[in-house]
Structures are given as structure tokens and as C-alpha cells.
Image (cartoon, rainbow, N blue to C red):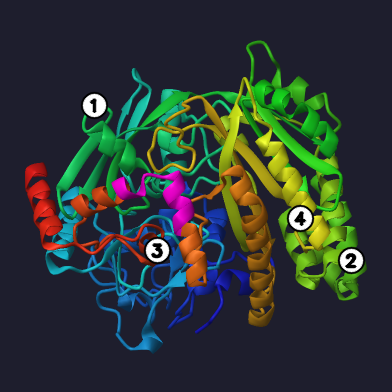
Amino acid sequence: PTSTCLCTRGPSGGPPCLRNMAGLRNVRRIVNWRCISETFPSSNFSRAVSSFHGTRVFDGDIQSATHRREWIGMGSLGTFALFASGVAAIGTANSVLADAPNDEEEESTIVNWSNTHECKPAAFHQPDSLEELERLVAAAHRDGRNLRPIGSALSPNGAAFSSAELVSVAMMDRVVKVDPSNGQVTVQAGARVSQVTEAIKPYGLVLQNFASIAEQQVGGFMQVGAHGTGARLPPVDEQVVGMTIVTPGMGTLRLSEDADPELFRMAKVAMGSLGVVAEATLQCVPAHQLVEKTFVASRAFVAANHAQLLRDHKHIRFMWIPYTDAVVVVGSNPLEPGQDPKKLEKSVKQMSEYKKVAPLRDLLLKSAPEMNTWARRGEVAAMNFAQLRDALLALAPLDTEFVKRVNAAEAQFWRNNEGVRVDWSHRVLGFECGGEQWVSEVAFPAGTLSEPSKADMGFMADVLELIEKEGLPAPAPIEQRWTSSSTATMSIASSPNQPDAMHSWVGIIMYLPTSDPAQRSEITARFNHYKQLCMDRIWEKYGAVEHWAKVEVPATSGGVTQLQERLQKRFPVDEFNRARARLDPKNILSNELVDTLFPRPPQGPFEWILAQVQALQGK
């Protein structure tokens, strides 16, 4: 039994999760999916899981392909669930936790990607067909049982988590159809973005844009309004041109711009509260390579040239490094005909990874003498950038003067990384997100590409000034990205009155590089203070609203009221709640987060009758 993720407790240099499972029993915690996916490529995951059949952790209980598939389905969570008494807790294919013991000692836990939220669901359902999903939703609606949809559990705020029952469509992961002539692909909602990318590659297609990682299930990818970067490119929900959702009140609905367009726009970004997404059709673009250029500029240079940088690059992001005059600019454009990738990459001085991370490694050896021994130097030499930064911040995460030194070393690391690389777009657009962390990301209007308002530069100037005046221990980076607007009603980037609007997205972070509960609690409190200062002094000035996957339930009633008022100003909340009442009249798909963001007034007799009539009309 363990109370921490096995990934962080595995032997140094050993494969992290699955091999640590061998010989263990009664594991009550979760193993992080990131480590499994890094150890075993997605194409080999089934084989990797099956290879552990027969070890004590599986206890001989996984005898059939169905049971193996259940474990693969669980692996599609952002975290990998290990249940009490090994696999004995797994029930039927559509109710994984149904047979788990009820006493608290035997509860199983799901933890999100960043290890900041967890839940102990009463049951975990994994339907493997649309018909099975329909039966599951209908039964929950009939009985009035909460049934919250969950994707890959990647959201930093645990957007899908609930102590009631969860339903995952991870086993509904088929690529249904590729339509090369229209450049579209139809997939079941449990398919991961990386799977879709691989499936459409032979047809010369690729998704238009990506978030930083590709392990999201397609359903969750769209429901929280994920986004990549590029001032001409919308958030990922705009890639959805058709979808099938299973609703409690109106059954299965197939939506598009040709079939109930108003509801389609509402349902594309709905945090799973209008229906369980079963299938989606995505608009793709021709596969292409990108030329990515990375350089470090001063704050003044970026402020003076940012509009031109946005216009000159298809994809671009800035990484601001607090307490330094360094802004990392990462921009990319499609490789043009006739351009030679090898010549482009050789045109810039190359440096080995070992030398690139030297500023962080040297600071670690200087700051932690216990690491600067013959026995430990090899361990330090093997660390990559993210590992070195975590090791450094673990020494004194809330010491502002020390954080300044870490940030300065990171700035030098990025100077060492200046250069050009050429690769396929899906590889270029993914990037390292760092380790466990608290994060708050907001988006706000920034004019248009032709007439930028400069609100994006004003916002960053205010954030950096706040950090440096208050002496906050703010680590790097503060990441800034851009998108065009979205037609999805509840998208953070929706702009119904200005379809050519440009939106800027800014995320602040504090890492959790330690497993010590007291220290993690101190970091959490300091991050909440950091975020509250941004909220009180900056957000309203720019009309900033938090990303649905990163908004947290405030700790005070005053904070809840403030949040609800901000959302009421920005979104058609009443219209959204009317759709919720129609599609989910008993509110079974919700959880604490959704009900806090969008409180529904209690239904009177007339409203109840109206909802039933509307549901019957829909059927």
C-alpha cells in the first residue's frame, strides 16, 4: 500500500509505473498516466499492459481480452487507476468499480494529471458501444443517479471529478470513418488525440491545431474548450463539425450546423453537462511540416514588435520569465516548397542537450552540496530540463530570491536553445508542460489581428509588475498564447459580436516539486494568494475569464458570488441553464464545479412539465 504515486517512488533509472506494479497488492492510489505513456508508446500500450498478465498485481484475474481492454480503457485516464486488492475490484465491462468493497479502507481514488485534485467515485462505468452508453444514461436518469462524464482526467481543476458515479467512453475509441475528399474524420469520443493523429496520417491529413499534449480523449478535448496557439486559428472546438451526444432527457442527439445549429454551438463546449459525447466529426487540414524558430528577446522588443510577430507566424507563443528581461519567443510557419529542412536546421549553431541544461545543473550542484558527490553527480547529469527545474525549486520553492536565481538559469537555458527545427506539425506543437503544478489560465479579447488593442501586452506588463512589486516567488514561465474567436456559445474565446476578434491566453503557475504535505500546502496557499492578486487587480480591467479546465471553486461564499457574477456578464448563462434543464432535467450529469459555476434555479411544477413536454418533443 502506498499513499503517493508510484511514479515518483520508483527506483532511479527504472521504468516508472507498470514494472513497479509487479508483486504489489492492495494499491489504493493512482499511477500517473504520463509516466506510462512515456515508457510505452501508445501503439504498444495494449501489449505492455498484457505483458504484465500473471504478475501478482494482476493476480491471475485478467484472463480475457475484455478484462485486458478494461485496463487499457483505464489507462486512457490522465492517471492510471490501481484498485484495492489488485484487479479483483473490477466488475463488468460497464461498471468497473461496482464490485469494489464499500468500506473506506478499500476505496479507490482517481487523481488528475497535475496531482492537485482527486475523487473517490461510487462506481466507474466503461461502456464499449453507443447502445451500452444509451442504456447506462437512461437507467441513471430513470433512477435519478448522478452519472458524471470523465475524459482523460487531465484537467488541472479536476473538471470531471465526482464522488458519485463516473462514466468514461475510453473503450469507445474507434476511428469510425476517414473522409479524405472532405478532409474529415469521424471518431468515437474516447479516442485520444494522438490516436486520431496516427489514424489520419496515411491519408495525408492532420488536425489543424493541438494543445500542448496529445493524450486527451476527443470528447474532453472539445468539452473544456482546449486551445493551441495562432492568432488566425480558433480553439480546437471549431474543428468539430458534427457530434453525437447521449442525453438523459432527450436521448441520443446528432448535432451539426445543419441539424439544430444553436444547440450544436452550445453543446460543443459544455463541460459534459448537456450530454455524454459519444462521437465527433473533426475537420482536418493537409499534413504539413513546420519550421519552428526559438529566440530570447527583451520585454521592450516584444512589446514593440508583438503585433508583427503575431502576423508573421501561423503559430506563436511567448514565455515570460519573471525577474529577468527575457521573453522566449517560439514561432512556427509551414515549410515552404523548395526549403531544405537540413539546411535550415544547420543554419543555427547547434548545442548538445547536456550543454543546454548546464545553467540549471550548475546551480543545482552549487545549491545542494549533497548532490555534488561522486555517487550523485551521475544522477544529476542524467536529468533533463524539467527534472532539474523541479529539483531546484524543491530546495526552496517559496524563497523569492532563490526563485529569481532559478529563473535566471532558465533564461540562460532558453538562450542555449535558440535555433531552428523542422518537423511535422503535430510534433512541433506539443511541448513540455513541467511537473506537478497549480495553474490558472485566463483568456481575454485583444482586438483583431489587423487592429490589435495591445491589451495582451498591457495584461503582461501588469502581471509582471504585480509579481515584482509584491515579491512573489513566481517561477517561469508565464505562458502567453493567442487564438481567433470561436462560434461555440460557451467557449472562453466566443465573440458573437466580433467574429474576427483575437483572444490572448495567459497562464500563471507554481510547481509542486515536493511530496511533503506541509510544503505542498504552503505552496498551494501562496499560489492562491498570487492568483487572488491577479484576479482583484488585473482580470476585470481586461475582461479576463478562466479556462474551463482551470477554474477552481472559490473557498468563500463571497468568492463564489464574484465568480458567478463574472460568468453572468460574459456568457448567456440563463440560456445555457435552460438547455441543461431540457437535456438533463434531473441534473444527473453535473458535479460541484458545474453547479457552482452555473447554479440552476429549483424547478417549479410548470418548469417540470415544460421540460417533460420538450423532452417528448425531442424524442
Q: Secondary structure at mark 2?
A: helix
Whole-percent x, y for residue 302 in the image: 78, 33
Compare residues 40 and 395 and report the one nearer the observer: 395
Q: Which amino acid type is marked by label 1?
A: Asp
Position of residue 531 in the picture relative to residue 607 (left or right): right
Position of residue 212 in the picture relative to residue 580 (left or right): right
Q: Which residue is mark 3?
A: 596
Q: Quadrant of residue 523?
A: bottom right
Q: Which residue is mark 2?
A: 365
Q: Quadrant of the C terminus?
A: top left
Give the CA distance from mark 2 to mark 1.
62 Å
Residue drawn at x 63%, y 11% is 337
Residue drawn at x 41%, y 45% is 571
Q: Which residue is mark 4?
A: 466
Q: Which amino acid type is marked by label 3?
A: Thr
Q: Earlier in the sequence, mark 3 or mark 4?
A: 4
Main SS, magenta region, reads helix
Q: Secondary structure at mark 3?
A: helix
Residue drawn at x 37%, y 60% is 594
Up the image or down, 535 lies above or below 143; here it is: above
Q: Can I make out residue 168 in this image?
A: yes
Task: Please name which of the two marks, 3 or 2, marks the residue nearer to the observer.
Answer: 3
Q: Residues within 10 Å of mark 1 (few under 14, many from 20)?
A: few
Up the image or down, 364 lies above or below 328; here it is: below
Give the CA distance from mark 2 to mark 4.
31 Å
